[in-house]
Image (spheres, rainbow, N blue to C red):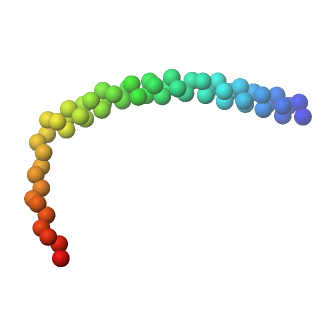
Amino acid sequence: MTTTILAAIGGATLILHTATRLPAALTDLVRACLPLLTAISDLRAALPRRRRPPRGRRR
């Protein structure tokens, strides 16, 4: 019984410790992706746009 309680307390401690670090990790991930998103945006702006012919009337 005591072992189960200690294991549950240890597991809860580990989960809470990890949960406190998640927001910082997500922030770092988003900041790391920003240059990639900027590069994709610049690439899309540099490429010429394709013109599609107007669609005819469907029957």
Q: Residue furthest bottom?
A: 59
Q: Percent from the top left, x then y, of residue 26?
A: 48, 28
Drawn side of residue 44 relative to residue 26, left or right: left
Quarter where residue 9 is shown:
top right
Which residue is located at x 52 percent, y 26 percent? 23
Q: Percent from the top left, x then y, of residue 32?
A: 38, 26
Q: Percent from the top left, x then y, of residue 5?
A: 84, 31
Q: Quadrant of the N terminus?
A: top right
Which residue is located at x 43 percent, y 28 percent? 29
Quarter where residue 14 is shown:
top right
Drawn side of residue 18 relative to residue 8, left or right: left
Q: Residue furthest right?
A: 1
Q: Percent from the top left, x then y, of residue 18?
A: 61, 27
Which residue is located at x 72 percent, y 29 percent? 12
Drawn side of residue 25 relative to residue 39, left or right: right
Query: From the viewer's perspective, is residue 46 above or below residue 28?
Result: below
Q: Quadrant of the C terminus?
A: bottom left
Query: From the viewer's perspective, is residue 54 above or below residue 9?
Result: below
